[in-house]
Image (cartoon, grey):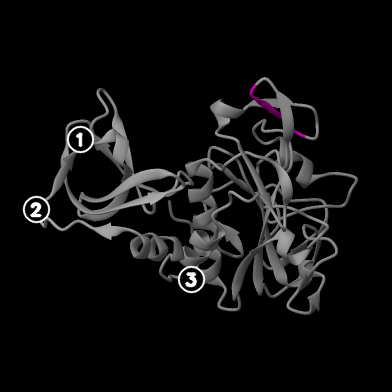
Amino acid sequence: MEFQIKNHRIEGIPFQAARWTGGTITPIIIVCHDTASRLDPLSAARYLQDNTSKVSVQFVVERDGHVTQLVACNKRANHAGKSTYHGRQYCNGFSIGIEIVNPGIMQDAGGGKARAWYGKTFDIEEYGIREVSTREHGSGFWMPYPEAQIEAVEAILVACVNKYSTIKDVTTHWYVSPGRKVDTNPLFPLGHLKSRAFGREDPAEDEADAAAAPVEDGDATVSINVPGDTLNMRRWPSFNPNVLAAIPHGTRVPLIKTGTFNRRTWHKVVYGGQEGWVVASYTE
């Protein structure tokens, strides 16, 4: 996925002008948010387009990767509220905002379900919801971001950084409003997205390589064992959105390294001219 910005708008996506838009800005940072809303398509975008709370944002990204732009990238949107970035207050005046559709922090509802603040319950296994506690977020149940959604966020970030040389950082709402906000959630791959936006090496890849053990046999291979299916090869050993390729059942691939991450064994293999990680239990 690749976006281009012309006249401060991404070409080829819907533009629905928000009601609450301010004057001209020079973007210095990009602030990522969770909508903490229902997952119904376009419901968050419609709310942020026109509401009585006087909030708005440049971009809204649905779970399927659909993007709506509401405010031009060089215009102020009311997305960050009371906020500070490296001593500079009120980030709305120098930032682009991206709202990512996600229910936000949830609580255990029992019976294998988690409950969002608005009462909706989600099946923990179906949505891959995880219980995580961090200093910045507190304790809660969190819904991961689909790969299509993260790919769209990445495409927005890359387009903005390429267009505006003034942009120096990608950050989150909890960072600029600590103690007041907890979005994006702990499963958001911020480091990966920042590295992609600015063309740097991904720290997750480097950390995984350093922690894994090289395979001594230079001719070692493994066979993908997922009858009737494909196995995702990932950029680093995690189920966060980072898929490089889908390897068909029965494919034999060169084995480079093996490591254990979060109590699960992963293999680093070569497929389609790329190196990536697969879950070892689906190989033989």
Disc 2 from disc 1: Cα separation: 15 Å
- Whether residue 262 is situated above or below residue 42 in the rendered picture: below
The residue sitting at 44% across, 61% down in the picture is: 204
**Where is residue 270 drawn, in percent x and y?**
21, 52
The residue sitting at 82% across, 52% down in the picture is: 55
Marks 2/1 in contact by CB < 8 Å: the verdict is no
Locate residue 203: give its quadrant. Answer: bottom left
Q: Which badge, 2 or 1, comes first in the chain's sequence?
A: 2
The residue sitting at 67% across, 52% down in the picture is: 184
* Residue identified by numbered label 2: 219
* Residue identified by numbered label 3: 198
**Quarter of the image with the C terminus in it:** top left
The residue sitting at 49% across, 60% down in the picture is: 192
Q: Which badge, 2 or 3, comes first in the chain's sequence?
A: 3
Q: Which badge, 1 or 3, comes first in the chain's sequence?
A: 3
Q: Main secondary structure of the magenta part?
A: strand
**Closer to us: 249 or 100:** 249
**Where is residue 90 drawn, in percent x and y?**
82, 70
Q: Counting other residues with Cα less than 10 Å from the Cα at mark 2, is it few (<14), some (14-19), or many (20 or more)?
A: few
- The type of residue carrying mark 3 is Phe
**Where is residue 191 drawn, in percent x and y?**
53, 62
- The type of residue carrying mark 2 is Asp
- Helix, strand, or loop for circle 1? loop
**Span colored in magenta:** 112-116
* Residue identified by numbered label 1: 284
- Helix, strand, or loop for circle 3? loop
- Whether residue 272 is situated above or below residue 73 in the rendered picture: above
**Closer to us: 75 or 29:** 29
Q: Is residue 120 magenta?
A: no
